[in-house]
Image (tube, rainbow, N blue to C red):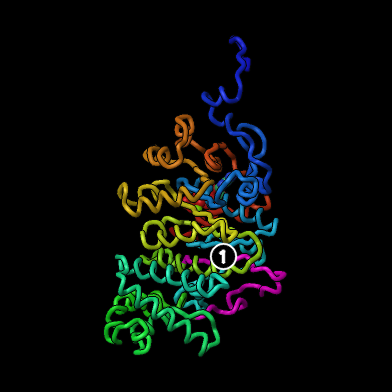
Amino acid sequence: MKLPGLPAHEATSAQLSAAYPFASARELPAGRVLIGRDLTGGPFIHDPFSLYSAGVLTNPNMTVVGQIGKGKSALVKTYLYRQAAFGRQLAVLDPKGEYGPLAEALGVEPIRLSPAGGVRVNPLDATSAEPAGARQDRLVLLRSLAEATMRRRVLPREHLALEVALDRATKAATELRRSAAPTLVDIVAAMLRPESDAASSVGVSRAVLEEDGRDVGLELRRLVRGDLAGMFDGATSPLARLGQPSVAECRAGVPPLVVDLSAVYHSEALGALMVCAAAWLQSMTSSSRALTFLVVDEAWAVLSDVAVGRYLRSSWKLARAKGLANIAVCHRVSDLSASGAAGSEEARLAEGLLADSETVVCYAQPSSEIPAIAAALGCSEEELKMLASLRRGVALWRVCGRSFLVEHLISTRERSLVDTDGRLRGGELHG
Ligand SMILES: Nc1ncnc2c1ncn2[C@@H]1O[C@H](COP(=O)(O)OP(=O)(O)OP(=O)(O)O)[C@@H](O)[C@H]1O
Ligand SMILES: [Mg+2]
């Protein structure tokens, strides 16, 4: 390196990295999707599945954090659009209703859920061809929903009542409707009015089983009756009614799926509703042979509730086994790492989620967030200093402990997919 007036100095990249951290970041193995410009020179390409195959990553999950309006969703939208060109399956949970243009560009309509919308998706649809696997996933979901709405842990006897109700409802759905999936309506009915033979199968009286299941049944009833009814309380509407092409039209694959929850964005139960939608998206993509991205935008709504956060964490852990890369979008690392007091379950959950996310994309953060970022990501001093002043579209990418400073480039063709400012100017965007 030679600067005017100074003697030339030579150093290896290992030595140089002490002064300028990004020089230490060796290139990632070739992947598929171009993100933009590595500001130390050259293109920046990232694909979690290629990196996983190359042994660079041990999990394909990704977390995107950053202040409002810095370009998090724009990155995710173009990333998905570019991944779709390589045959990747996409499933998006869209709480603000801003992925419509992406859905349209991919030839589908978003599935807009609202209490009076007339279309439903069933969060209890099977996530596995194995009945035991599907049963386990349903139990985890029901338990999380009950705990989220009751704001406390489910007691052992309540869990038993839930298991009995699930088995009863699954059997009835198979026998009466020839459907393998029970609905939340079936579960609530089985909990509030258990049958004597179901009770005797677990060695209690009908009255005891009814009492044990009462609180959980009444809480789940909110999703079936009242203000939250009409979205998750029945069999899944046919794809055509959901505005989707048939599976055959998508050449035997599952169509790209965008679930728009903007109609309930301000509900206090948004976290629980997002978990219902996420469970359904998992069921839809579980039969897909393609590698899949499952995006939860505005993930703070899920993570701010420990019970639904627990559900998200358990599904992230299964990512590798299911050929699934989860992407969560949040404002702050402290949405994750400080969602509870140190050592609390909330804090452990959040730390686990970051640990299960080997790609973290960090847009500009206020200086108050720097300690949380330093603790969670182990960034260098130089990187931390830079974070407060990153301009829109530029982020620090941490990929398996390596750092890259990347400018996300958007093509003219992609502009219409990402323009949330325009919608804001037009007063359309919520929140
Ligand atoms: N790399 C980029 N280059 C140019 N413009 C960009 C870039 N990234 C985002 N923008 C523009 O910035 C605006 C805000 O972007 P985006 O909606 O992605 O922000 P966000 O971080 O998701 O905000 P929020 O936290 O409110 O969800 C959009 O209109 C988008 O077009
Ligand atoms: Mg956004």
Q: Is residue 195 above or below residue 184?
A: below
Q: Which residue is found at the position 41% from the left and 71% from the top?
A: 142
Give yes or no for residue 137 being in the magenta stretch: no
Residue 152 at what x, y percent from top left?
29, 65
Q: Is residue 353 above or below residue 258?
A: above
Q: Is residue 222 above or below residue 151?
A: below
Q: Which residue is found at the position 36% from the left and 78% from the top?
A: 221
Cβ at disc 1 under 8 Å from ligand 2: no
Give yes or no for residue 258 being in the magenta stretch: yes
Residue 190 at what x, y percent from top left?
38, 84
Kindly tell me whether residue 421 is visible in this rendering.
Answer: no
Q: Residues within 10 Å of mark 1 (few under 14, many from 20)?
A: many
Task: Name the quarter where the N terminus is drawn.
Answer: top right
Q: Is 87 displayed left or right of 343 in the figure? A: right
Q: Which amino acid does the dot numbered 1 rest on?
A: Val
Instruction: Give the secondary structure at mark 1.
Output: strand
Which range of residues does the magenta coloring cover? 235-262
Q: Nearer the viewer, residue 89 or 408?
A: 89
Kindly tell me whether residue 415 is visible in this rendering.
Answer: yes
Q: Tell me how many marks there are.
A: 1
Q: Quadrant of residue 237?
A: bottom right
Task: Name the quarter where the C terminus is drawn.
Answer: bottom left
Query: Mark 1 — residue?
Result: 258
Residue 96 at what x, y percent from top left?
48, 61
Residue 320 at what x, y percent from top left?
56, 56
- Main SS of the magenta segment? loop
